[in-house]
Amino acid sequence: MKIAAYLRSNDSRTNDRVHHFAAALGAELTYRDRPVECDLAIQAGFQISPAMKDAMDRDVPFIILENPVWGKEEGNYVFSYNGLARGGTVPNCDELPFRFHPPLYSWKDWEGGQTTIFGQVENDKALRGADIYRWVEGCEEVLPRAVFRPHPVTLSRPDQANQESFEETLKKTHLAITYTSTVGSQAVIAGIPTIACHEGSLAWDVSSHSLSEAPVTPDRELWIHRLAYRHINLNEAVPVEYILSGYDEARANAEAGKYDNMSNGRPQ
């Protein structure tokens, strides 16, 4: 099987992920604007580059490397086939040994404190075409007492400096409202009942999806075990056998045209 891994042409921290992943899988390194014929393509970031367009045009599966739920500063990143987060697939790991993950905190009483709506960056590909501000307005109509926390990237520098820290916000929050942000999973780990409004969220399987229903507080052990197997660290060995065990499913999905939509909801 020929594997191609695509780098950004400019120096980028995400290229470190591609180098790490590619070396373990024996991939040929090239650049996003120079697609090559391959059986599996690898890219950091959920964008339709010439390389990703070429893969989809030829019904070839790809792996997207993206920001993790935990441990970004320690070199963590996550992977999935043919999409981003839960919009992609990963191999089954239910019978595999324990893998490191943060501890799960006890569930909070969702009525015992602040409800927080967590914003995302406008036009981020993770939104898959949704208007984040319209979504926030809809949430506020249903939950008028909720507090909106904008994504720091959307704020001016002075406003960023004055914004309450993420950690302090989590301490206050007893109910988290998210769209597809990794905040959803971070909130669930922190024991905060969560409403995730899009199935691409990694918190989808342990969250509610309706603003008008009481949130759920399910068992999270299997969920976080599966989430741990998505995480890879730049300073540790890549679990190649596990990753490639998902190739056949990913290839079948690609041949059927089942790719997650990375073109902001437009046809790709």
Image (cartoon, grey):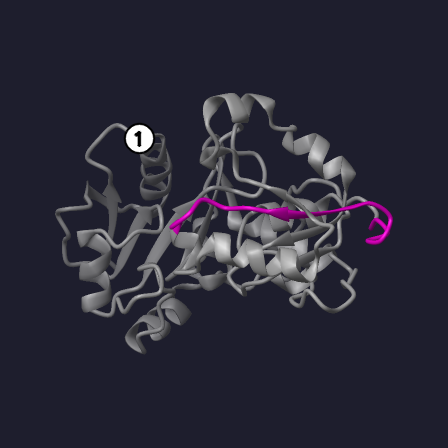
Asked whether the viewer can see residue 22, the reply is yes
Compared across the picture, whether 224 is left or right of 87 comes to right
Quarter of the figure with the C terminus: bottom left
Task: Find disc 1 in the rendering and name its residue.
Answer: 12
Q: Which residue: 67% across, 49% down?
A: 98
Disc count in the image? Answer: 1
Magenta highlight range: 107-124
Q: Position of residue 46 (x, y in %)?
A: 35, 51
Q: Nearer the viewer, residue 232 or 104?
A: 104
Q: Nearer the viewer, residue 147 or 46?
A: 147
Q: Which residue: 46% across, 36% down?
A: 154
Magenta stretch contains residue 123: yes
Compared across the picture, whether 25 is left or right of 6 comes to right
Is residue 184 placed above or below 198 in the rendered structure?
above
SS state under label 1: loop
Q: Main secondary structure of the magenta part?
A: loop
Compared across the picture, whether 137 is left or right of 206 comes to left
Q: Which residue: 72% across, 68% down?
A: 212
